Every structure is written in structure tokens, then in C-alpha cells.
Image (cartoon, rainbow, N blue to C red):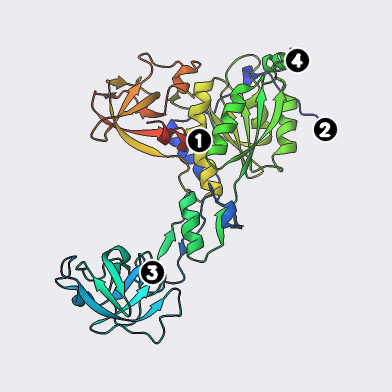
Amino acid sequence: MLRLIFCMPLEYKFKAKPYDVALKESLEAFKTRASVELVPVTEAVGRRIAFDVKSRSDMPPYDMAFYDGYAVRYEDTFGASASSPKKLRIVGQVLKAGEEEGLSVTSGTAVYLSSNSPLPEGANAVVRDEYASREGDFVLIKKEVGLHEDVVLRGEDFKAGEILVKKGKLLRPQDLVLLMEAGIYRVPVYREPTIGIASVGDEILERFEKGNPYPDDYCLFISALLRLLGIKTVSLGILRDDPEEIADFVSKNIGLYDALALMGGGARGAKDFTGVALDRIGEAIFHATTISPGKISGVWKVKEKPAFLVPGHIGSAIVCLYNFVIPVMSKIYYEGTPLVNKVSAKLAVAVEARPGSYTVRTVYLNPKEDGTLVATPLLKRLGGSTLLTTLSKANGYIIIPPGARLSEGSVVEVTLFSPLELLSF
């Protein structure tokens, strides 16, 4: 077996780029190759539609009664009241579609209907049962009604050719009902890509060997977030701080998954070999950038697929995830459909960024009585990427441009960590 010979990282040179350049070139490095699968509507909740889905017919397909009652000409009810009812002759009944054929409502007549039944010809309103009383072949109308009152008009819900679900939309339970009502039982959705994730580090292996069941819990956290956004994950274990092992792992696994993410080993320490290994088997788009935390993030192209270097500190890992991993995966496998939600909010306090560096600040959101969201940064000092409470208490984050100072009350764009955050404020 051919073994690669590696130098120590003292000779390794970071391919550092400004944040905006690093993101732009990472997106440009990979072609879109999204694939689509047709799935039953019953299994489509949480999936993203790959094409606009249009209605094939009007819904409802005819004018229909909204309640049980009597189909009438609304003109025949003018002046009707409980003390002075209008008397109309009943000429038939319609309890289901098809029974209206041959029936018609003319001046002075009415037809009894059950809810959702089609209106017979000539009818333009419905008088509910509670506003009428039957006397043999006649009905007493005790309430004046307006044109089309308690009638659902043909196509009022949606019309033939109307877009029911737009491309890229995340399907909700109510969307599934809408599609099934429209007679659509299979829908085209994007195939969910899969990222193989491995942790790198002798110290993580030591925790595993000492019996810790989740020695790479940061990796578990990253996997859970990605799955919420429509990206499947597979845990591929823990790699030693060994450049040959890392390179061999990537070579063997890159063809099995849509992308790989290696967590850790990307800094300048004597045991940081992840960048060294990836350089030998792939093309570095960048390694190190001007966003903090997350400065040592990196993206490589290996056999036309992305391999991500995710920093080992949890705060830095999150920044890499949302600013490089998710955008690149979206571009390749979802045709650029945004996978994260963003909201506008007003800053509760002033914040600032270091010169020359984009600064990420986690925030939690509170709604005011007028519906405005207020974003409160969780740390007064910059950095703090290892503090888990900055994530557990947060709903999302903001990015402050280099050297900028945003005053209290400034409107900012908050990137939410997942759709679940919408339920928490």
C-alpha cells in the first residue's frame, strides 16, 4: 500500500482569505448537482419542494354550500325576518354532487342542500337551517341574506394553474393537506444530501478510551443542527492527530458521501494536521479567514466534492457551519435555496467589531408588544467561542462588519440557528 510522507506543520502555509472572498470562492468552486426524488405526500413533511407545484383544477370545482340550508335567489329574501318570514316553495334537494343536475332555482323557489353540496342553477345564496323552518313543501326564510352569502365560489380556494407550493418551500402538515385536496399524491422534493462527519484529536480518543459514551459531543451537536436543516449526517468516528490517517480516511470516504466534515486539527499547533492532510489530496479553496470566531475554518475540493475543516471550538464550529458548510451544501444540493431563517430585530445595546475582522455575536430575541423583535447580545466582550451558554441561551447570531459600531436600536439581520427558534419567542 502506498503511504504518503508528510512534513510537520511547521512548513504548512495557511491559504488565508478575507471572509467575503472565502465564501464567494467556496460557492464558485462547486457546480450545482441537485437531484430530485418523487415521494408520497404522506412522507413529505419537512422536505423541500424542488419545483413549483401547480393545481390541475379549480377548488372547489363548483359553487357550493358552506352550511346545511336552502339554496335561494338572494333577491327573494329581501325584508325577511323572524317576525315577517318569506315563504318559498321547495323544488328539490341536493345532498351530494350530481344531484343538482336538472334542478334550478327560480323566483319564489328554494332547494335544500347539505354542506359542501353544489348549488343548483339559478341559486346565488344559501340560507342556513337555523334561519329557516319547513312547512310541508314550503320553507319560511327568517333572515335576509346577501349575494353569495354562505356560498364558496368555484375556484375561491385556488384555481387551475395556480401555484400551490413554491419551489424551495419546506413542506408543513397544512401543505400536505392542500396538495392532497388538489389531487396531488406524490411530490418532487430535493434529495437530502449526506455529510460524513469525523472528529480529529488524540484528546478525544482518550475520552473515548476512558469510557465517555459521547467523547465528540460537539460533533453530535453539529450533526443535530444539520439534520434540522435538511442535511443528513453520518458519524464516522474519531481520527488520531496523524496526517496519514486523516488523508487515508478522506480518500476512502469522499466517494461514499456528498461531503465530508472534519472537526478539529486546523490551527497552528504542533499536532494540527487536518489542513496538511487535506492539502495533499485536494485543492484548498481557503484555510483561515477574517471572521471571528471561526478564523481557522477551511474548504477543500476533493474529487469534485467539498471537504470542510470545522474548528474544534464550539463557537467557531457554529460560525463555520452557518457561513461556509450550509451555504456550500445549499448551492450544490438545493440549487441555492436558503436553508436557514433570518429575521430583522433591533439591538438592545450597542455592539462593535475589531478592525479587519467580521465579528459574530450570538443574540437572544424578545418580542415587544408591537411585534418588533429585540436582539440582545449574550457577551459584552468579544470572542468567547468555547462558552456553551452563548449558544444554549441564544436564538441566532448577527455579523458585524470589520471596525463597525452598531448603536442601540439599530436594525440588524439575525440568522436563526434552526426553525425551532421560531417557537421560542
Type of the residue with mark 2: Leu
Q: Which residue is mark 3?
A: 159
Nearer to us: label 4 or label 3: 3
Q: Is the residue 158 above or below the residue 192 in the image?
A: below
Q: Secondary structure at mark 2?
A: loop
Disc 4 from disc 3: Cα separation? 63 Å
Q: Which residue corresponds to the image point at 37% horizontal and 29% vertical from the top-left?
A: 398
- Mark closer to the observer (2, 1): 1
Front residue (pair 229, 13)? 229
Which label's residue is closer to the chain start, 2 or 3? 2
**Residues tagged 2 and 4 counted as in contact (Cβ below 8 A):** no
The 10 Å Cα crowd at callout 3, few under 14, some 14 to 19, many 20 or more, is: some
Circle 1 crowding by C-alpha within 10 Å: few under 14, some 14–19, many from 20: many
Report the mark closest to the observer, 1 or 4.
Answer: 4
* Quadrant containing the C terminus in the rendered view: top left
Q: Please state which amino acid type lies under the numbered disc 4.
A: Glu
Q: Position of residue 137 (x, y in %)?
A: 32, 80
